[in-house]
Amino acid sequence: MFAGVERVLRSVDRDSAEFSVAILDVTRVDTINDPARALLASMSTTLRAAGKNGFLVDPDAAVIVPGRGFDDVVLGTIDDAVAAAQDWLGSPAPSIRPKPDPRACLSRTKEHRSDQRAPRRRHP
């Protein structure tokens, strides 16, 4: 895990001029060692010192243990992280998932119904 965190930190450092807020999703991380955890914590500190912010999606508290001073940037879902990032930026949060077009849903339903013809009834 340590090498993976180092790659993330290098990417953040290299690309930091291109963003104001970063979101790191560690939902599928089961375990993390203490040095990697410390590197992630330092990333948050570095971003804040540069006038930026970072949010961590860690629903199982696998990476950042609650009560360690990062509770304001550790969130349970991507949607929550995007909303927090938008709040921090001062703009309304857009929906991450596009809303389905009701007309498209309706036309698919009609196509589906036309493919399934009712069985013919036998007359006595």
Image (cartoon, rainbow, N blue to C red):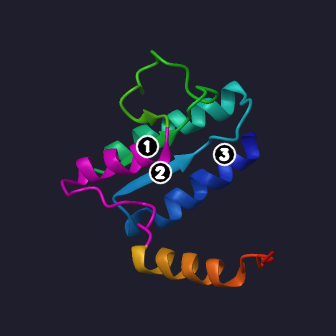
Q: Amino acid at mark 3?
A: Val
Give the total number of marks visible in the rendering.
Answer: 3
Percent position of residue 105, x then y: 50, 74
Q: Are marks 1 and 2 in contact (CB under 8 Å)?
A: yes
First in sequence: mark 3 vs mark 1 = 3
Q: Nearer the viewer, mark 2 or mark 3?
A: 2
Q: Which residue is mark 1?
A: 55
Q: Nearer the viewer, mark 3 or mark 1?
A: 1
Q: Are marks 2 and 3 in contact (CB under 8 Å)?
A: no
What residue is shown at x 49% (from left), y 41% (from top)? 77
Percent position of residue 104, x then y: 48, 80
Gap in angstroms between the C-alphas marked 3 and 1: 15 Å
Query: What SS does tag 3 mark?
Result: helix
Q: Which residue is mark 3?
A: 5
Q: Which residue is mark 2?
A: 23
Could you tell me which quadrant the C terminus lies in?
Answer: bottom right
Percent position of residue 13, x then y: 50, 58
Query: What SS does tag 1 mark?
Result: strand
Residue numbers of the magenta segment: 77-100
Mark 2 residue crowding within 10 angstroms, few (<14) / some (14–19) / many (20+)? some
What residue is shown at x 67% (from left), y 55% (from top)? 7
Mark 3 residue crowding within 10 angstroms, few (<14) / some (14–19) / many (20+)? some
Gap in angstroms between the C-alphas marked 2 and 3: 14 Å
Residue 16 vs 70, above or below: the answer is below
Gap in angstroms between the C-alphas marked 1 and 2: 5 Å
